[in-house]
Amino acid sequence: MTTPPIPDRRRWIALAIVMTASFMDLVDVTIVNIAVPSIRQDLGASFSAIQWVTGGYALAFAIGLITGGRLGDVYGRKRIFLIGVTGFTVASALCGMAADPGMLVATRVLQGGTAALMVPQVLSIIHTTFPAEERGKVFGMFGAMVGLGAVSGPLLGALLTEWNLGGLQWRPIFLINLPVGAAAVLLGRRFIGESRAAAGLRLDLVGMALAALGLLMLLYPLTQGRDAGWPLWGFVSMGLSLPVLALFVRYERFKARKDGSPLVELSLFRVRSFAGGIAVQLIFGVVCGIFFLVWTLWMQLGLGWSPLRAGLTGIPFSIAVSVAAGVSVQALVPRFGRRVLQAGALVMAAGVLLYLGEAHRYGTGIHPWQMALPLVVMGLGMGLIVAPLTDAVLAEVPREHAGSASGLINTTQQLGNALGLALVSVAFFSVVDAAAPTQPVGEVFTRAFGHAMWWLVGGLLAVFLLLTALPRRSRTAASSAAAGEVDQAPAQDREPAPIG
C-alpha cells in the first residue's frame, strides 16, 4: 500500500532532497561536454572514446529508465532511490579517478545506469508524497529546476575545468558529486517516506529485455552513426528496432492479461492527457537536443569563444526559464489552462526567429549581450512549457503506476534528445560538410546554425499542435473534485485531468 503524504515540514525536506539529486543528474548530463578538450588531452583519448564518454551515459540512462521506475513500484521508491543515489555517487568517484579512456567510458556507463534507478523515483516520490492540490506548485518548482540544470552544467563545467582545482584538471566535474550524493543519502534515509505499488506486482523480466534491446538497437546507431559514416548496419538496426518494440507492446498486453504486472501500463495511453503529453515530450526533446548541441558548437568552434564565455552566455536563458516556470504554474495555468503551454511554444518559436535575425545581422561579430534578448524570449517560452507539462502528463496516473509512468516520461525525453542529436547531422553538419574548404570556419558555422534553427521552429509548431490533446480546463476549476476522487476512481473511469 502507498503511504499517506508526509506531514508538513518533512515532505518539503523530502522534496528538496529528491530535487537536489535530480539536479545533480541534469548537471552531469551536460557538464562533461565543456571539459572534453581537457579530458582528451589528459588521457590521450580518441574521438570515438570521447563520444562514448557522453554517449555511453545517455544510452545506459535511456535504456534503464522504464525498468528503474518499475523497480521502485515493486520494491519501494525510497529504497531504489537511495540505491540509485549511492551508486551514482560511487560511479562519480570512479569517473574522477579514471586512469585511461576505457575506464572512464565504463564508469560513465555505470553512472548512467545508476541514474536510471535514481531519476524515475523523483517524480514518483513527488506524485505519492504530495496531495493533488499541491502537485501543480511542486511540479512548477521541478520545472524551474530542470531549466536551471540545463544551463548550469556547461557553466559549472567551465569553471571547474578552468580553475584546475588541486591540479586535477577535469576531474572535479565528477568529484563534486560526492558531497552532494552523500548528503542526499543521509538525509533521504530520514526524511523520505517509503511508498510502493499495491501488493501483487511482479518484475517483468521479458519486458525489460525486449525494451532494452529495442531501445539499444535504435539509440546505438543514432549515437555512433555520424562518426561511423552512417553505415548500412546502423539503418538495419534502427529498422529492426521497430518490430522488436512492436513485440514488446504485444507482450506487455499479454502480461497485463496474465498477471497484471507489465513493465509498462499500456492502459495509461488511453488517457488523452498522458498520451498527448508523451508526444509533446518526444518532440520537445528533439528540439532541445538539436538546440543545445548546435548552440555550443556555434559558440565554441564557430565563434571561437572560451568555455567560460560560452557558459556565461546562457545565464539569461536559465533565469528566464526559472521565472516563467514559477509564474506559469502559480498564476497562469490555473486561469488559462493549456493555452499557457501553447503560448509557450509560440513564444519560444518567436525567440528562435529573433535569434536567427541576430545571427544574420551580426554574423561572427556577435557579442554575448546581443544574444541576451533572444535567449530570454526562448527561456520564457520554455518555462511556460516545462513546468506544467509534467503535472499534465502525470495528473491522471494512478499512484500504483507512478514509477512506470515517470520512467516513460523520462525515457521519452531521452529518446527525443537522442533523435535530436542524430538530426544535428542533417540540420547542422550537412551545411558544414557542403561548405568549400576555403570558406572561413566562423561564417560556415554561423550559416549552419541558422539552418538548424529553422528545424527548431518546425518542431515548436508541431508541439503547439500536439498540445491540443491536453484538456482545456485548469486545475483550479476542479482541484477539489480531483483531490477527492483521484484515489477512488479507476483511471479509465475518470474525466480528463485538468492542467496545472
Image (spheres, rainbow, N blue to C red):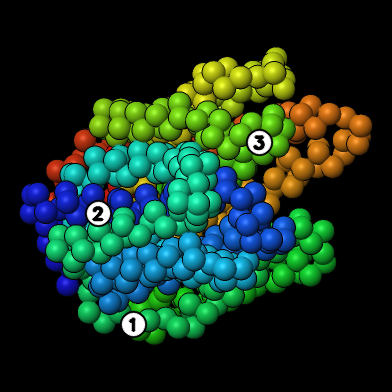
Name the quarter where the C terminus is drawn. top left
List the residue tagged with mark 2.
17
Discs 3, 2 touching: Cβ within 8 Å: no
List the residue tagged with mark 1.
202
Please name the residue shown 52% across and 80% down the image. 209
How many angstroms separate mark 2 from mark 1 (CA)?
28 Å
x, y percent for residue 165: 45, 48
List the residue tagged with mark 3.
300
Give the amino acid type for the residue marked by disc 2 in the picture. Ile
Q: Earlier in the sequence, mark 1 or mark 3?
A: 1
Q: Earlier in the sequence, mark 3 or mark 2?
A: 2
Instruction: Classify mark 1: helix, strand or loop.
Output: loop
User: Picture quarter containing residue 451?
Assistant: top right
How many angstroms separate mark 3 from mark 2 (CA)?
34 Å
Numbered circles on residues, count: 3
Front residue (pair 445, 332) = 445
Give the amino acid type for the residue marked by disc 1 in the picture. Arg
Left-right relation of 113 to 226: left
Q: Which mark is residue 96?
A: none
Name the quarter where the N terminus is drawn. bottom left
